[in-house]
Image: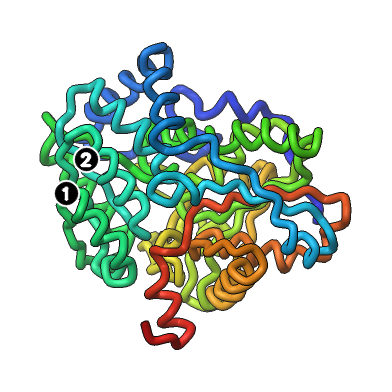
Amino acid sequence: MKFKTKKINFHKFPDEFGRFGKFGGRFVAETLMPLLLEVEKEYEKAKKSKTFKNQLNYYFKNYIGRPSPLYFAERLSKKLNNSKIYFKRDELNHTGAHKINNCIGQILLAKRMGKKRIVAETGAGQHGLATATVCALFDLKCIVYMGATDIERQAPNVFKMKLLGADIKPVKSGTATLKDAMNEALRDWVSNVSDTFYVIGTVAGPHPYPMMVRDFQSIIGKETKQQIIKAENRLPDVLLACIGGGSNALGLFYPFLNETKVKIIGVEAAGKGINTKEHAASLSKGKPGFLHGNYTYLLQDNDGQILDAHSISAGLDYPGIGPEHSWLKETGRVKYFSSKDSEALDAFKLCCNLEGIIPALEPSHALAFLLKYKKNLTKNTIVVMNMCGRGDKDIFAISKNLGVDL
């Protein structure tokens, strides 16, 4: 598998207009522009604030439980040609996924801006759960928009969000999944400009959100760099993560982008197959277009209408991708592949049986690709995979697919 990339300082992007090459930007209604400019201005101030950084580090350590472990998956490694497979275990974070890294950062920013009302969208429920958790911590009103389809298949997280005091707004338009929930959250934000802050859960949306979410999630890769050097005295050969909107992946990838000897692989959801109409592989089968305020790869028809996405995993069931991923694809720095629903289920079961870890369906897609990548692994190959979420949220969906009556 060949990896060729242009000579670029990847850490200089986005540019002042929020562009990653031709991708990204800020394509929104006039009513949204002042809000985005305000968020960008306050975020630039916060990045330079010692108080903000100290607050962020305090909650990362004492509330989330960072650093998350880098775990050597010994039995899995033996199965994969005696290579060395490490899991970056962000599923051990408070709330069970990487999402809370970003939520702590954005809600600390919202508090700096004096906002008392938080809106968010969620698919798998992990971002909604993390947002509801941090809102409870800081006594903020929380409204979570969630597709009716996702509410049904993510019942455990819906119940947790309600326990934490969040107001769940079911979205029945479109496919009643993540894309539609994001549409409604944006409408809410425009309608409640004075007291509301919109916490986007992935590296998508208009600038500065793709940059901001990536920055907060990059703690994953920063820790991984230190941990793998301590464990192996060198950087890994391969980084691997699943891709929905792409925040867990960029969180791991970003600190390594200029380390050109490290191969980086993102894995999309192939659903029932990328040659069918039921998948969520926007980088593999999509083309550039406009959605949710940015220019990026999308699943769309010849008229530019957004197509329905499908994945067994609610967190990957999105017809677009973060604009930085689109740029990384075109520069060749990251290679993108896909795994089907059935492959993710097989990988899920294998991880349970070999490592005693019940993964979410999202990282199960990355693990499924790793199993297919076996022929490229040797005894000396070091792989770090982001185990970005745990599987308790998926037990009902998985049991249904495996024919088990709970």
Residue 393 occupies quadrant: bottom left
Q: Is residue 130 above or below residue 219?
A: below
Q: How many marks?
A: 2
Relative to residue 14, is residue 231 drawn left or right? right
Tell me the number on the disc at residue 343: none
Tag 1 residue: 165
Crowding at label 1, few (<14), some or many (≥20) Cα neighbours within 10 Å? some
Is residue 26 in view?
A: no
In this orientation, which residue lies closer to the viewer: 189 or 384? 384
Amino acid type assigned to the residue bearing label 2 in the image: Ala
**Callout 2 secondary element:** helix
Q: Position of residue 143 (x, y in %)?
A: 18, 47
Residue 236 occupies quadrant: top right
Callout 1–callout 2 Cβ contact below 8 Å: yes
Relative to residue 317, is residue 264 drawn left or right? right
Q: Position of residue 139 (x, y in %)?
A: 17, 35
Residue drawn at the location 83% of the way across and 65% of the way down: 375
Is residue 199 in view?
A: yes
Residue drawn at the location 60% of the way across and 33% of the way down: 223
Tag 2 residue: 136
In this orientation, which residue lies closer to the viewer: 381 or 274? 381
